[in-house]
Amino acid sequence: MSALKLFDTDAPTNPIDIAAELRECEQIIEAKLAAYCDVGTTLERIRVRKLYQLRWDTFEAYTLERWGISKSNAYRQINASKAIATVAEVAPVKPTKSAAEALAEHNDDPAFQRRVWDRAQAEHGEAATAKDIEYHASMVMLEDVAATAPATQKRVVEQSSRRLR
């Protein structure tokens, strides 16, 4: 039995065909990322408005029984969609799912999220990963501490920041 072939593995060689196929692939990814954000936003709407109560006692029961999504995954998706919405206000490029989930750790501080995303974008562009987000979040936190700390603490923070690199 042969393995399932999802696409033709013979890549185009003509630069125009390569560019066209890349555009096609990126449009698919862009649509799926938008859908991920829409699902999170819609789950939050169902949760906040308690629309699930028509047939289920809890939001957690609704997501598990209706969609097969655990409580933690539902909330992860909701939080990631909030993070995407926050950074989308100032950045034309939306974060990947994993980067959005890392940004969601800071949903309580949208300004901080934007600073972290701006730095990740500046250094990594569209390829910013969750690990990049975590690194830049640490750097922004260290800088914030250094900006408000006495001179001796600033040196400690600067030394710690050099070790992180």
Image (tube, rainbow, N blue to C red):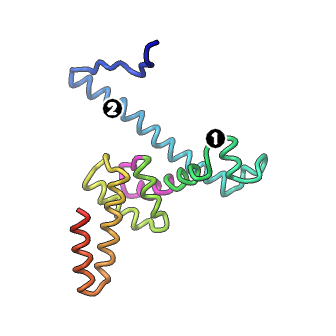
Residue 5 occupies which quadrant of the picture?
Answer: top left
Residue 97 higher or lower than 8, as above or below: below
> Looking at the picture, which amino acid does disc 1 mark?
Gly
Specify which label sits upstream in the sequence, 2 or 1: 2
Check if residue 89 falls in the magenta segment: yes
Task: Residue at 41% x, 37% y: name it.
Answer: 29
Q: Position of residue 109 (x, y in %)?
A: 45, 68
Q: Where is residue 165 in the image (x, y as percent from the top left)?
A: 23, 62
Classed neighbour count for the residue bearing mark 2: other residues with Cα under 10 Å, few (<14), some (14–19), many (≥20): few
Q: Position of residue 96 (x, y in %)?
A: 40, 47
Task: Residue at 64% x, 40% y: name it.
Answer: 67
Task: Residue at 21% x, 68% y: name it.
Answer: 162
**Viewer-proximal residue, 82 or 140?**
140
Residue on which the image places disc 1: 68
* Left or right: 12, with 104 as reference point: left
- Discs 2/1, front: 1
Residue 144 occupies which quadrant of the picture?
Answer: bottom left
* Left or right: 113, with 71 as reference point: left
Q: Which segment did they paint magenta?
A: 81-96
Q: Distance between the residues labelled 2 and 1?
A: 33 Å
SS state under label 1: loop
> Looking at the picture, which amino acid does disc 2 mark?
Arg
Residue on which the image places disc 2: 23
Residue at the far front in the pictured view: 1
Check if residue 147 falls in the magenta segment: no
